[in-house]
C-alpha cells in the first residue's frame, strides 16, 4: 500500500514540478509578434498580470481587458505588439467603447479617455491627441470665433481643423478635452478627426517584477504541494486505520447495515457550492426573486428555445434569464458539460453566459448578461424602427461585428444554427452582442420535435437543410446573408403582405441583385441616391449577400471570407486578400 501511495503521489506531482521550472519565455497570439512578460495568454494565467484573449484566431485581433480608476472594465482590441525594451512594450489598440460612440456619432464620445490602472504596470498615451473645448451653451463664443463647433444639447464642442492652430487660455465654464487624433484624416467632421485607435506605452513599475512574480509563483506552488502532500498522507493513514478497524468490526458483528447505492446518490447529488466545474450555479429561488417571479412585464422576448425575462441579481448585476422549453433533461452531466463549454467562450460580440440553475432545480434556466438596447430586428422593422438611429455606417459595423462573432464560434467548432436579426442584440453604443449561440448543443441530436429542438427559423433556414436535415457552418453563412439583406432593405425576413414570390426576403433579394436592381432592394433612407460612397458600399454588400444566399452551400464563402470581404468593402485601401473573383469593382472606386 505504501509503494502504491508513493507512485500515486509521484504521478500527481510530476506535472506540478515541471510547472515550477517556469513559464514559457514567449507566447504566440494570433497575428501579433511573439509576446512576453508582463503579457500572457489564456491557459497561462499565472505567467503574467496582463492576459490577452482570442489568441486562437490566426487572422483576428486579440482582445485585452483592463479596469479604469473606477473599476469599470475597458476592452481594447490589440492591433500590434512592439517590445521597446525589457521593461516596456508599445501596444497599438482600439478602444471598443470609443469606437462605438464615434461610429454612432454620439456626444458621449466627448469625454477624456480614462487610462487603465494596475498595481504593477504603468500606462502612458503614446499617440497624438486632439485638444478641444467642452463648453456650456451659455458661454460667449467671442474668444472662439476661429473655432468650429459641434452642438450636443447642453454643451458645445469647440475645435480647430488644423492641428497647429493656437489654443486660447482656458475659458470660464469650459473644460479642456483631449482625445486621440486621426492623423490621416482630411475631413473637418469632428467624428472623423478623432479616432479610437491609439498607442499605449506599457511599462513595469518594478524592474524586478518579472523575476519576483515567477519566484513567488514557484514558492506559492511549493507551498501548495507541501500542503497537498500532507493532506494526502493524512488521508492514507486515516484510511489505513479505518479499514483495519472495519475488518475487526465486520469479523465480530454483521448487524450494522451498509450504505445503499441510493443513499450514496442522494449524498453526491446534494446542492453544493455556487461553482460546478467552472460553471456558475444559480438557485431557482434566487432567479425567481431577480425576475419578480418571472413577471410578464419583465418579459424581453419569446424565442425558439424559451422565454427571456429581465432580472436583477442581489449583487446588482442586470441579467437576462432564459426559461428553456425543454424540461426532460435527464442527462444532467452532459448538460453541465455543454454549459461549461459555452461559458468558456469569450468574445466582445457574444452575449456572456453567466451560468445556469443546478441539477436540483425545478426548471432549466440559463443566465446571460443583459443587453439594454433591443435587437437589430427591433431597430429595422420593430418597435424602435421609427427612431431612424440605424444609419448605414452603424449597419455596416453591425454586419462586421456579427460576422466577427460567427468566425469566432466556427473557430471554436460551434455552429450557431439560428442566426437572425432578433438574435443580434445592441448595447447603448450600438455594438453587437450575438445571442442564443450553441444552445442547440444542449439537446440530443435525435430530438425531432421543432418545439423542443429548433433547427433554424423560417426565412433564415438553409434550403439544403430540407434535403439532408443537417446544419453546417455554411448554414450560418446563408442565415447571415438574410441578415445582410435585412440591413440593406430594412424589411423583415418573412412578410406575407408582400407578393407571393417575394414573401421570403432571400428570394426577393436574389431576384433584385441578379437583375442589378439595387435601388429596388436598398432602403432609400440610407442615402443610396444621394451619397456615392453609400451607393458603392451598399451595392458591394448586396453582392456579398448574393454569394451567401446561394442554394448550393458549396458555392457560399466561409464566414472567415465574409468577414474579410466586409472589412475590405468598408476600407478599400487596406491590403486584404481577394475573396471573390469578378467582384473587384466594389474595391476599385
Image (cartoon, rainbow, N blue to C red):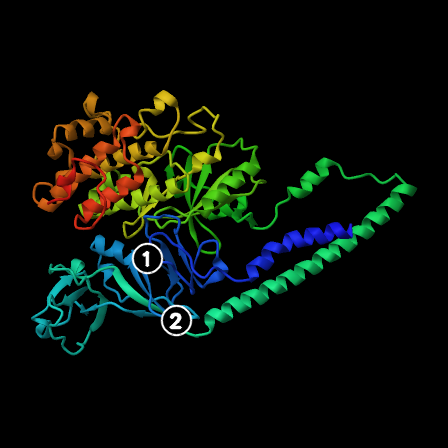
457 in relation to 258, above or below: above
Residue matched to label 1: 78
Q: How far is mark 1 from mark 2, CA to CA?
A: 19 Å
Dot 2 alpha-carbon crowd within 10 angstroms: few under 14, some 14 to 19, many 20 or more: some
Residue 411 position, x and y percent, is 38, 42
Q: Nearer the viewer, residue 524 or 131?
A: 131
Query: Is there any visible trace of residue 388 in the rendered image?
Result: no
Q: Please indicate whether residue 470 sits to the left or right of residue 156 in the image.
A: right
214 in relation to 342, above or below: below
- Image point (17%, 63%), residue name: 183
Query: Is there any visible trace of residue 127 in the rendered image?
Result: yes
Residue 199 position, x and y percent, is 28, 64
Q: Quadrant of the C terminus?
A: top left
- Image point (21%, 68%), residue name: 128
- Seen as rendered, the residue at the extreme right is 252
Could you tell which of marks 1 and 2 lies nearer the N-terminus?
A: 1
Residue 64 position, x and y percent, is 37, 58
- Image point (11%, 68%), residue name: 162
Residue 300 position, x and y percent, is 37, 41
Q: Nearer the viewer, residue 195 or 134?
A: 195
Amino acid at each position: 500500500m505504501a509503494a502504491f501511495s508513493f507512485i500515486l503521489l509521484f504521478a500527481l506531482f510530476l506535472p506540478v514540478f515541471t510547472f515550477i521550472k517556469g513559464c514559457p519565455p514567449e507566447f504566440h497570439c494570433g497575428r501579433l509578434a511573439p509576446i512576453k512578460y508582463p503579457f500572457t495568454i489564456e491557459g497561462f494565467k499565472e505567467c503574467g498580470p496582463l492576459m490577452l484573449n482570442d489568441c486562437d484566431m490566426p487572422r483576428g485581433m486579440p482582445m485585452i481587458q483592463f479596469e479604469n480608476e473606477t473599476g469599470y472594465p475597458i476592452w481594447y482590441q490589440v492591433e500590434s505588439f512592439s517590445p521597446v525594451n525589457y521593461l516596456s512594450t508599445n501596444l497599438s489598440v482600439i478602444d471598443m467603447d470609443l469606437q462605438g460612440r464615434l461610429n454612432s456619432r454620439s456626444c458621449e464620445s466627448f469625454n477624456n479617455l480614462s487610462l487603465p490602472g494596475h498595481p504593477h504596470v504603468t500606462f502612458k498615451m503614446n499617440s497624438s491627441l486632439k485638444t478641444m473645448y467642452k463648453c456650456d451653451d451659455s458661454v460667449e463664443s467671442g474668444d472662439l470665433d476661429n473655432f468650429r463647433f459641434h452642438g450636443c444639447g447642453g454643451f458645445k464642442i469647440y475645435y480647430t481643423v488644423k492641428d497647429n492652430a493656437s489654443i486660447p487660455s482656458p475659458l470660464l465654464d469650459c473644460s479642456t478635452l483631449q482625445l486621440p487624433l486621426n492623423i490621416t484624416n482630411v475631413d473637418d467632421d469632428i467624428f472623423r478627426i478623432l479616432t479610437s485607435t491609439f498607442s499605449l506605452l506599457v511599462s513595469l513599475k518594478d524592474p524586478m517584477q518579472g523575476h519576483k512574480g515567477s519566484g513567488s509563483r514557484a514558492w506559492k506552488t511549493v507551498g501548495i504541494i507541501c500542503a497537498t502532500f500532507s493532506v494526502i498522507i493524512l488521508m492514507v493513514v486515516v484510511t489505513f486505520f479505518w479499514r483495519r478497524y472495519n475488518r475487526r468490526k465486520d469479523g465480530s458483528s454483521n448487524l450494522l447495515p451498509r450504505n445503499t447505492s441510493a443513499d450514496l446518490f442522494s449524498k453526491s447529488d446534494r446542492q453544493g457550492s455556487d461553482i460546478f466545474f467552472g460553471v456558475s450555479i444559480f438557485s431557482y429561488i434566487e432567479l425567481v426573486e431577480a425576475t419578480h417571479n418571472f413577471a410578464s412585464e419583465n418579459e424581453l422576448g419569446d424565442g425558439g428555445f424559451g422565454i427571456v425575462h429581465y432580472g436583477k441579481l442581489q449583487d446588482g448585476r442586470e441579467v437576462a434569464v432564459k426559461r428553456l422549453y425543454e424540461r426532460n433533461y435527464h442527462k444532467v452531466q452532459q448538460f453541465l458539460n455543454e454549459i461549461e463549454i459555452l461559458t468558456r467562450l469569450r468574445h466582445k460580440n457574444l452575449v456572456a453566459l453567466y451560468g445556469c440553475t443546478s441539477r436540483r432545480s425545478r426548471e432549466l434556466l440559463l443566465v446571460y448578461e443583459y443587453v439594454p438596447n433591443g435587437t437589430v430586428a427591433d431597430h429595422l422593422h420593430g418597435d424602435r424602427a421609427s427612431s431612424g438611429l440605424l444609419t448605414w455606417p452603424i449597419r455596416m459595423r453591425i454586419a462586421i461585428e456579427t460576422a466577427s462573432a460567427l468566425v469566432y464560434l466556427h473557430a471554436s467548432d460551434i455552429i450557431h444554427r439560428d442566426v437572425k436579426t432578433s438574435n443580434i442584440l445592441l448595447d447603448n453604443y450600438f455594438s453587437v452582442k450575438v445571442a442564443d449561440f450553441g444552445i442547440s448543443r444542449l439537446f440530443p441530436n435525435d430530438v425531432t420535435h421543432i418545439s423542443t429542438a429548433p433547427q433554424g427559423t423560417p426565412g433564415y433556414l438553409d434550403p439544403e437543410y430540407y434535403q439532408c436535415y443537417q446544419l453546417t457552418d455554411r448554414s450560418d453563412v446563408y442565415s447571415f446573408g438574410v441578415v445582410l439583406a435585412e440591413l440593406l432593405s430594412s424589411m423583415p425576413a418573412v412578410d406575407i403582405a408582400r407578393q407571393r414570390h417575394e414573401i421570403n426576403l432571400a428570394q426577393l433579394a436574389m431576384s433584385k441583385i441578379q437583375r442589378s436592381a439595387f435601388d429596388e432592394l436598398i432602403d432609400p433612407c440610407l442615402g443610396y441616391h444621394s451619397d456615392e460612397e453609400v451607393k458603392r458600399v451598399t451595392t458591394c454588400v448586396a453582392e456579398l449577400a448574393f454569394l451567401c444566399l446561394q442554394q448550393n452551400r458549396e458555392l457560399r464563402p466561409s464566414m472567415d471570407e465574409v468577414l474579410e470581404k466586409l472589412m475590405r468593402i468598408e476600407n478599400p485601401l487596406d491590403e486584404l486578400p481577394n475573396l471573390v473573383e469578378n467582384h473587384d469593382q466594389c474595391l476599385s472606386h
